[in-house]
Image (cartoon, helix red, strand yellow):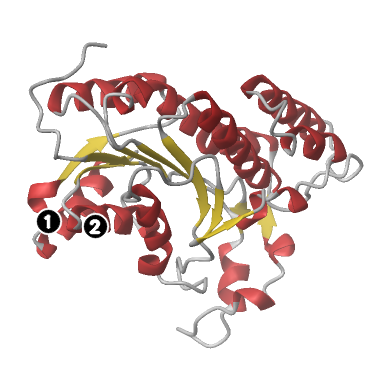
Amino acid sequence: MEQATSFPATKRYAVVTGANRGIGLEVCKQLASNGVTVVLTARDEKKGIEALEGLKGFGLSGHLLFHQLDLLDPRSIVSLADFIKTQFGKLDILVNNAAVGGIIVDSEALAASRGREGAEIDWRKINWKEITTQTYSLAEQCLETNYYGAKRMIEAFIPLLLLSDSARIINVSSGVGQLQFVLNEGAVGVLSNAETLTEDRVDEVLNVFMKDFKEGLLEAKNWPTYLSAYTLSKAAINAYTRVLAKKHPDLMINCVNPGYVKTNGIGVLTVEEGAQSLVRLALLPGGGPSGMYFSRMEASGF
């Protein structure tokens, strides 16, 4: 790709996936408040535009745009990359936030956990295994969105990020993605070895996991039996972050667990608190850490 010369070097541009609500929306708000021009993306165009309109009341309209994005459709990713190239000529910040849980929650059982009408749910007292269901098709969608979708985004935007003098990739992870929760000995052996880790080896782990899932062998093979696909998707994105950071030493690429953020009345942290850990990494000065896993603001082990 030719070097873009018609765009002011001082301006910074960001893309945030899954940004029509929750942490993603708040990240857009905080980045825009710091003078970054942010492209808010969402799969649902109507919800994305509504989210954008909601932020205009904060006086940020000059720093915010919307573009539809479906991580399960490679053409949608290419369309967004073409838009960024045409509009800005480069990208400075990519926040891979979009994710699905890979489970179906029994909403009636969850509501019953709330107790009295309108009370906040005490997430620590909920038996999540009893009120959730996970299927093979949900697991496929989870990996495709959380891992392969983020990976396709990175592959599409690397050429534009390499044109930035302050490129940052932030992959949103989770505490359950740490290897202590993966359990399967073979998977942990592969994902924990930074020296031999490759994209292909990460893919091999996920292929074995999905084979065992399909054959009903999760428990027998010592895979996580709750939030199974979600756990593996986040462990995979953590591993991929390390591979990518080694491959592109001039970029700052990190993954972060923002903490248990309140959504639908469940959680501990506010969305503002959750977003802060992502925004901090996005705005770090040059020479900062890369290939690291952060638990909120602190570097942690994989």
> In the image, is residue 208 above or below residue 269?
above
Decide: marks 1, 2 in contact (CB < 8 A)?
Answer: yes
Farthest front residue in view: 287
Q: Which mark is residue 29?
A: 2
Tell me: 38 left or right of 43: left
Give the residue number, with chain letter if any, for mark 1. 60
Horizontally, residue 37 falls left or right of residue 252, namely left
| Mark 2 neighbour density, 10 Å: few (under 14) some (14–19) many (20 or more) | many
Q: Residue at x 66, y 76 (%)?
A: 124
Specify whether 118 is left or right of 188: left
For label 1, the crowd category at 10 Å Cα-Cα, with few meaning under 14, some 14 to 19 and many 20 or more, is: many
At which x and y percent is residue 152?
45, 25
Q: Of the residues under marks 1 and 2, which one precedes in the sequence?
A: 2
Q: Residue at x 13, y 27 (%)?
A: 87
| Alpha carbon separation for disc pair 1 and 2 | 8 Å
SS label for mark 2: helix
User: Could you say where residue 232 lies in the image, as x and y percent from the top left?
Assistant: 68, 41
The quadrant of the rendering that contains the N terminus is top left
- Residue 119 in view: yes
Residue type at mark 1? Leu
Assign a secondary structure to mark 1. loop
Work out whether residue 141 can be spotted: no
Location of residue 215 in the rendering, given as x and y in whole percent from the top left corner: 84, 31
Front in this rendered view, residue 84 or 169: 169
Say if 88 sits above or below 97 in the image.
Answer: above
**211 on left or right of 69:** right
Please tell me in which quadrant of the rendered image residue 73 appears.
Answer: top left
